[in-house]
Each structure stands twice: as C-alpha cells, then as structure tokens.
Amino acid sequence: MPLFAVYAPDYTDDEAIQRRLAVRQAHLDNAAKNPAMKVGGAMLSPNEALDRPDAEKKMIGSFMIFECDTYADVKKMIESDVYWIGNVVRSSFDDTLYKR
C-alpha cells in the first residue's frame, strides 16, 4: 500500500494558535485511533529554536505520513479532521507519494 507524506501549514492570523489549542486534544485522540496514520506531529518554528531547549517554539503546521490506497483516501481524512474543520490548517495542503 502506498505511503503519502502530508504537510498542512497552519493559518498565520493572530487567533490561529488559539484555534489549534482548542481542538488539539480531539485531533490527537482521533489520530491515535487512525490505523492509516503512521507518523504525525506538529511542525515547529523557528528551526534554530530546536537547537536550544529553553527557546520558545511555535507550532506552525502539521506533518503526517499516511498509508492508504489512494490520494482521495488521504484527502478525505484530512478534510474530516478537526484541524481542517476548525480552520487551524489552511485550505490547501501539500501531499506527496512517498516511496520507502
């Protein structure tokens, strides 16, 4: 079965992080129950902050790898997620067929 790598950037308005945090637990709970999701997590910025444990880190999007039959399956999962419905991630996302 093919793997799909998905990057879903967050909106950048001032309220975006509050929308993310408001539905984050539901998003994590749903992701944990989804057998198609193989890897997932928040993208952080700025990159330099990752080298310093005490630096402020800001969530700026999500990265996931899904194992699904088709692109349409992945799209349906993304568009039914609370991050999509709750206007956390932008209405476009990048996905790429990933080959092991």
Image (cartoon, rainbow, N blue to C red):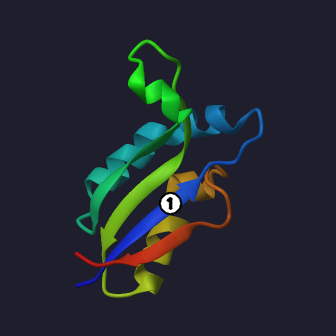
Relative to 40, is 49 above or below? above
- Residue 50, percent across and down? 42, 28
Q: For the image shown, how many numbered marks are present on the structure? A: 1
Report whether 54 appears left or right of 61: left
Quarter holding residue 26? top left
**Looking at the image, which residue sits at the far top?**
54
x 67%, y 52%: residue? 87
User: What is the x, y in percent for residue 54?
Assistant: 43, 12
Tell me the quarter of the image containing the C terminus: bottom left
Percent across and percent down for residue 67 are 28, 74
Foreground residue among 26 and 64: 64
User: In this picture, is 14 found above or below 95?
Assistant: above
Identify the element where label 1 is drawn.
strand
Q: Residue at x 55, y 52 (%)?
A: 83
Residue at 43%, 48% (x, y): give it. Answer: 27
Q: Mark 1 belongs to which amino acid? A: Tyr
* Location of residue 53 in the rendering, given as x and y in whole percent from the top left corner: 38, 17
In the image, farthest residue toward the right: 13
Left/right of residue 87 with respect to residue 73 in the rendered view? right
Q: Which residue is mark 1?
A: 7
Image quadrant for the N terminus? bottom left
**Who's the residue at 42% across and 38% down the image?**
25
Q: Residues within 10 Å of mark 1 (few under 14, many from 20)?
A: many
